[in-house]
Amino acid sequence: MQRVDLSKPGERKKLIGAAVLGVVAIAFLYWVLIGFDSGAPATTVRPASTPAPQQRPSQNAAGNDRTPTTEIAALARFTEIKYEPSSYNAP
């Protein structure tokens, strides 16, 4: 039993159209999943070595403009979060 009768021009056009659509679909999936990247490979930026620690400025007599220490800044991350759910309840 013959699957495709290529002697008929209508059947031949259908088969060629199906093959073209298949190739287009495979090319599109390749483009979506992998991509046609023709550019140069991206260069990674590596940071320089760790900068030297800066000296702390001398404390002035007033002491009003002091910056918080790292311990106080670390404790500020543990502030209480108040979560209020919305009044709308979805079914």
Image (tube, rainbow, N blue to C red):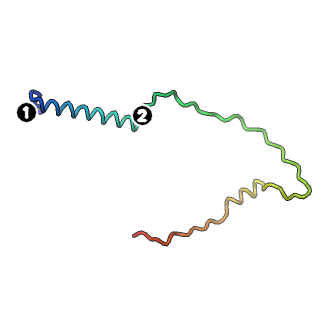
- Helix, strand or loop at label 2? It is loop
Q: Horizontally, is 79 left or right of 63 in the view?
A: left
Q: Quadrant of the C terminus?
A: bottom left
Image location of residue 43, percent across then percent down = 57, 30
Q: Nearer the viewer, mark 2 or mark 1?
A: 2
User: What residue do we see at 75% from left, 53% from top?
Assistant: 70
Q: Which residue is mark 2?
A: 35
Front one among 50 and 65: 65
Work out which residue is located at the far bottom of the displayed protein and give it: 87
Image location of residue 45, percent across then percent down = 62, 33
Front one among 10 and 57: 10
User: What residue do we see at 46% from left, 28% from top?
Assistant: 38
Q: Which residue is mark 1?
A: 1
Image location of residue 73, percent across then percent down = 73, 56
Total label count? 2
Q: Quadrant of the N terminus?
A: top left
The reply to whether the C-beta atoms of the residues labelled 2 and 1 are less than 8 Å apart is no
* Amino acid type assigned to the residue bearing label 1 in the image: Met
- Residue 18: which disc? none
- Helix, strand or loop at label 1? It is loop
* Amino acid type assigned to the residue bearing label 2 in the image: Gly
Label 1 neighbour load within 10 Å: few <14, some 14-19, many 20+: few
Label 2 neighbour load within 10 Å: few <14, some 14-19, many 20+: few
- Which circle's residue, 2 or 1, is located before the other in the chain? 1
Q: Is residue 19 above or below residue 86?
A: above
User: What residue do we see at 44% from left, 71% from top?
Assistant: 89
Q: Horizontally, is 53 left or right of 25 in the view?
A: right
Could you give the CA–CA distance between mark 2 and mark 1, rounded to whole angstroms? 41 Å
Image location of residue 7, percent across then percent down = 9, 27
For residue 12, which quarter of the picture? Answer: top left
Q: Is residue 22 above or below residue 71?
A: above
